[in-house]
Every structure is written in structure tokens, then in C-alpha cells.
Amino acid sequence: MLSARRRWTILAVCCLSMFLVGLDTTIVNVGLPAIGRGLGVGTRGLEWTVDAYTLVLASLLISSGALADRFGRRRVFQCGLAVFGAASLVCALAPSVGVLVAARALQGIGASMLSPVALAIVVNAMPDPKERAQAIGVWASVFGLSMAAGPVTGGALLAGLDWRALFWVNAPVIAAALLLSAVFVPESRAQRARRLDLPGQALLTLVLAVAVGVLIEGPRIGWTSPAALAGYAGAAVAAAGFVWVESRRRDPLMDLPLFGRPAFSGAVVGAVAVFVALNMTLLLNTLYLQHTREWTPLAAGEATLPLAVGATVCAPWSGRMVGRAGPRLPLLLAGGFITAGGLCLVRLTPHTSVLLLLAAYALIGIGFGFANAPITNTAVNGLPPARAGVAGAITSTARQLGSALGIAIAGGLVTASSPAGLAHASRPGWILVATCGVLLLLVAHVSRSKEATTGPASPTAERGSAHHAGAEAHLRPGDGKNVTAGRPVEPPTA
């Protein structure tokens, strides 16, 4: 078994990579007006600048885990860092919005090689259930901090530099992560690598791209236009095709029988809801404060500090609560706080009190901090290690899908609004944020059932996920080599 110091060092290295993934999901938000002015692009182009990253990331997370099984987790992890770094340089030098969107998509490819591999490493480095729950709390804290700190960091960079600095800042973090991963993260592979599911991958990408594309372009083309109707039909057909293909493959991209477990399905819905709420909050905040109230990017970023502080403080606390008593209480707290934060702003006006704004952001941040650890724990709870990886990859995909949907919906609400009318146009967005909180309350109710989280897995599901994301790998004490799990690691208990 790895020493405690080594285990927590590995966690720190993985958290550094996740900091990059989360930061680049939100750091661009506060710089969108500056990017728009610099490249001469409107709101729809700016939405694609954000969603090109999250869409590609959501689409490729699971396949990247399979690649890591085949070619080595540390190798794929380091490849992801290199791709992410190269794409960041292209973003910083982009002469047009087309190049920027393409480079953001390339960033998403690199980021997809980081999340599932890092989560599998953390899950397997922490064999004790309580220690693992605490580690997931730290993981969620760092990821929450990166997501919430993005606007603050972006605002600080824009105060003295231009928007290209939002991408240059990645360079030192990538260099540090590459060095530390080479020193501390052991190489490992699955004993039997999963086959790549190319049809499933293509269909999943098509479903996500069409669905989010219609949301972004809907205000321009019309929600009932022939193009929009074709988009709805295409997404539905692709989704049906994806389910059909996945149900017939020996090594499916997505382990569909997992969705038969109510707790797992609830965790996926909760992951989408949390990230819809967070990203809608961050984008509406940026547009409202900079366009309607004419705040500087730095001031708009600083307004999210209560959100960042709430997320950072509550995420590790949530992890400890999950380790002691299970996920239900932190999920209830998360749902309650997010609901309250959204309701605070359903009557937003151009002159809403700054104190009310800050209070709403703080409530949403606290809710976000409480949410991530119990969602991850609920998703993997009761599963053998061979299935923890695929469960974590699916919930990571759900998070990024929520991010993309939040940006697309928020942009669609305000894309045609004048600065004076933006506050009123954003009110349905705040109602949706509150609704996301209510969904978390329902997830908490589902997680209460012990049978829902610990029921036996179906044979089909076991066969389909037995080698996903390296979650079955262990390190034999003293030799640092990967072997097949002969002694199961007990997952976190609810």
C-alpha cells in the first residue's frame, strides 16, 4: 500500500490538473465582453467560445478513460497536459473568433485526458472509505475553487492586460503539473484494455453538439423554424441510436445499466443541475454587471468572491460529512442554498442592491460547495472498484454537459436584450437556478434509500464496465507495479 504522504501527494497532483480544467471552464466568462470587442463578435460567437470547450470535454471524457487503460494512465495524463498547453498558446494568439473557437475545442480534447484519469487515480490511491470520502471532498473543493475563482482571476488579469492573458496564465500550471506527475504519479494500465467504441462516441458527440447548438442558435434561427425542428429531430434520432448501439456492445462507451440504479441516475441529474446553476450564474453575472451596470471586468470578477469563498469552505466540509453520515444531509444543504440564491434574484432590476447580489452569489457558492462530494459519492457508492471509474466518468460528463447547457440557456435568454433590458430578460434564468436547487433536494431523497445505492449490479453492467478508467487497478505494496484487483477496495459508504 502507498504511504499516506504519497497518497495525498498524488491527490495534490491530480487536483492541480483539475484546477486547470475547472479554471478554463469559467475564466473566459468574465473576459467575454473584452473578447467580443477585440475580435468583433457578438453574443452567439462568445457562447461558442465557452461551449466549444465544454462540449468537446463532455463528449470525450469516457473515451479518454479507455485510452488511458490501453496506453497508460500517466502517459495519457501527460499527453492531455501537453495538448491543453499547446491549445492555450493558440488561444492566446488567435487572430479571429473561428481560430479561437477551434483552439478552445482542442483545449477540450486535452482536458478530457485529465479528468477521468485523475479521478481513477484518486479513487484507487485511497483504499479506506472515510479517507476516500475526505479525498473526494478535497477534490471537489479544488474543482469548485477553480470554477468559482475563474471570474476573479480573469478580472484581475484583464485589469492590467488584455484578454489573451486569460490563456497565457495556463503555462506555469501546466509546467508544474507535468513535472510533478513525472515524479509522483505511478504508471499503470488495465490488464485488459477496453475497446474504443467509435460509433457510440460519434453518436454521443452528435447528440450533445446538436442539442447545445440549437440552444445557442435558437434565438437567431427561431425556435420553430425548419432548421430548429431539424435539430430537435436529429438530436432525438441520434440519442435513440446511441442507446441502441450501447445496449449491444460488449464494451460500451457508456454503461447504460447503471442508470437503472435510482441513486446513480439521481446523481447524474444532480451533476447536470449543479453545473447549469453555476454556469448560468457566472455568465448572467458577467453580462449584467459589465453591460447593465457598467462595472469593470475586475469588479465583476470580485463580485463572485462570495461564491468562490462559499464553494471553497464548504466542499471539504461536505466531504467530511459524507464520510461520517452519507450524502443526504450535504445534498439537502446544497439544494436549499442554491434554491435560496436563485430566488433572491428572480426580481432582478438594473438597480438591485449590491448586498443582495453578493448574498445571492454567496448562497449559490455554498450550495455548490456542498453538492459535489455527495454527488460523486452517490454515483460510485455500492459499486465495485471496476465500476467506480465508469461511474465517475459519467458524472464528470454530466457536469460538463451542465456547464454547456447553462452557458447556452443563459446566452439565449439575453442575446437580443439591450443593456437596460438585460436584468428583466435574465429573470427566467434565476428561476431555473432555483429549480436546479429543487432537483438537488429530490436527489437527496433518492440517496436516502440504501437499496438504491447498494443493490447488486447486473451481469451485463459488470461485463460492460469491468475495465473502464483504470478503477480496477491497484499497486502492490513495495513494487509500484499495476496488478488486477485481487483484493477489492471498498467504495465510500452512504
Image: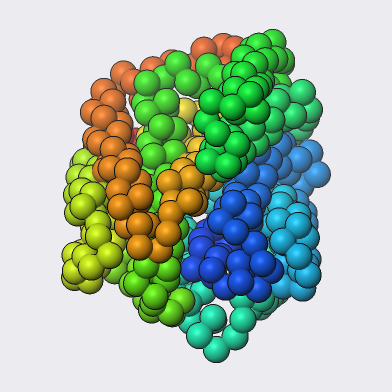
Quadrant that contains the C terminus: top left
- Tell me where residue 381 sits by quadrant: top left
- Does residue 344 appear in this view? yes
Q: Position of residue 216 (x, y in %)?
A: 56, 43
Residue in the foreground of this view, choosing between 479 and 354: 354
Please give left or right for residue 19 compared with residue 149 in the image: right
Above or below: residue 156 compared with residue 266: below
User: Residue drawn at (42%, 71%), measured in percent from left and top?
Assistant: 290
Is 409 placed above or below 45 here? above
Task: Give the mark count.
Answer: 0
Please state if 102 lies on the left or on the right of 170 as rendered.
right
User: Front-most of 338 and 8?
Assistant: 338
Please tell me which residue is depicted at 69% across the width and 30% down the height of the picture.
206
| Residue 175 locus on image (x, y percent) | 70, 74
How is the rendered protein coloured? rainbow
Question: Residue placed farthest to the bottom in the image?
Answer: 160
* Residue 267 or residue 106, whichever sits in front: 106
Q: Residue at (55%, 34%) from the top-left corner?
A: 222
Q: Is residue 359 left or right of residue 131?
A: left
Residue located 37% across and 28% down the image: 266
